[in-house]
Amino acid sequence: MDLEERLRLIKLPPIEEIVTEEELIELLRTKEKIVAYDGFEPSGLMHLGTGILRAIKLKDFLDAKIDFIIYIADWFAYLNNKFGGNIELIRKAGEYFIEGWKACGVDISKIKIVWCSDLVKDVEYWETFMKISKTVTIKRALRAVTVAGREESDVKSPSLIIYPLMQATDVLMLNDKKGVDICELGMDQRKVNMLVREIVEEFGRKKPVAIHHHLLRGLQTDVKMGSFDENETINKEISLKMSKSKPETCIFIHDTREDIERKIMNAFCPPKDVENNPVVEIVKYIIFRKFDSFTVKRKEKYGGNLEFKSYEEFEKSYKNGEIHPMDLKVSVIEYLDEILRPVREHFEKNKKARELYEIVRDATITR
C-alpha cells in the first residue's frame, strides 16, 4: 500500500485535524511500525460516538497498517468521580466497553488494550509525572482540565489538576513502553495533546502526531454552552457533543427500534441546514461510512425515493431543500436500526456481555 492511500485512510471522516500533516507524512515515509492510541474513561453506556464511530475509525487505521492501542482510563474515571468514585464499578464498565467495541465490529485480536491501572504500576510512570508537574504551570494545567469534560470553574479539588498531568504522562509512557507515535483522540482532548507537544522535547522525546476526530453532536439543542476552549468553533463542538449523561440527546448502542424512532423524531433537524444538524451528522459520519449509498424514502406524490452515492451529493440536495426533514428522519431511523441490530443481539446472546451491560445500565451515573 502506497503512502497516499495510507494517508487517505487516516484522513477519512470523522478526522477533523492533524497536527501536523507534514509530520504524519514523514512518519509514514520513514517508520515501518507505527502505533496510535485513543483513550476512554469507562463511565457509562456507549453511544454512537464511543461505539460505532470508534469501530469505523479503528478499521481505517488498521487498514492503513497502523497498529492501535485502546487505553482504558479507569484511574481517570476515578479522578473524575465517575460512578461516584467506585473503582470496582469503573473497572466493570471498562470490561463492558471492550464487549461494546466487539459488538460494534472491532476485531479485538488486531488491537492492544492497555489499562491505566496497569500502566501506573511502573515506578517510571510517577517519576515522569513528577517531572511534568515541575514543568507545567498551574495556569497551564487549569487550561487543560477541560479534557475531563470540566470547565476551569469546576475545579474544587487537586484531582482535576492531576488529571491532565497524568494524561500527559500517559503519552510519554505509552511512547516509551508501547511505541506510540500518534495520539488519535477527540477534539475535546486536543488541549492535552498540545500541552504534550509543547513540553515533550524537554524530556528528550519526539513530538507525537496529534490527530483529532469530530465529536458527534447531541440530538437536541437545549444545551448550555460551556467554556471548554478559547476557539469558538471548538468550544461549540465540545458543548454540543452527544453525551451519555443526557440520554434523550444520544443514541445508545443498545437502543431498540422504538428508542431510535422516538429520539430521532424528536431531534433538532432544521431544513436546508447541514452545519447545525445532528441528523445530517449521523448521515455523514455514520451512514456513509457504513454503506456505499443512502436512500431517502419518499412517497411517489413527492417525487419518490432519492438514492445518493456520496455524502456530498446528499448534502447538496438537502441544502437545496429537495429533502424534507421528516423524510430524512424516517430514513435515518431505518439505517440506524440496521446498524445497531447486531450490537443488540451480541448483548442479548453473550452471557458475559449481557451481565456487564446490566451492571453498567443499573449503576448510578455521576457526571
Image (cartoon, rainbow, N blue to C red):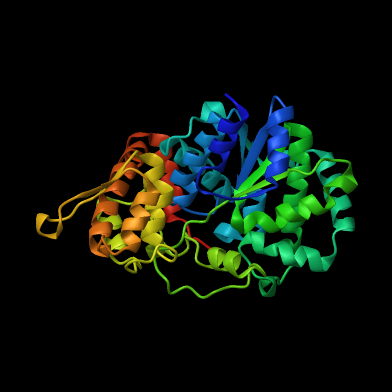
Q: Is residue 50 above or below residue 153?
A: above
The residue drawn where x is 59% and y is 36% is 7
Quadrant assignment, res 279:
bottom left
Q: Nearer the viewer, residue 106 or 20?
A: 20
Query: Residue drawn at (33%, 43%), measured in percent from left and top?
Result: 309
State the image coordinates of residue 196 (x, y, percent, origin top left). 77, 51
Residue 130 located left or right of residue 348:
right
User: Considering depth in this image, is 223 or 247 the residue closer to the camera?
Assistant: 223
Q: In this rendering, is residue 229 above or below 93?
A: below
The N terminus lies in quadrant: top right
Residue 322 at what x, y percent from top left? Answer: 26, 61
Q: Is residue 158 visible?
A: no
Res 100 quadrant in image = top left
Decide if residue 256 is on the left or right side of residue 117. Answer: left
Dividing the picture into quadrants, the one containing residue 354 is: top left
Q: Residue at x 19, y 50 (%)?
A: 305
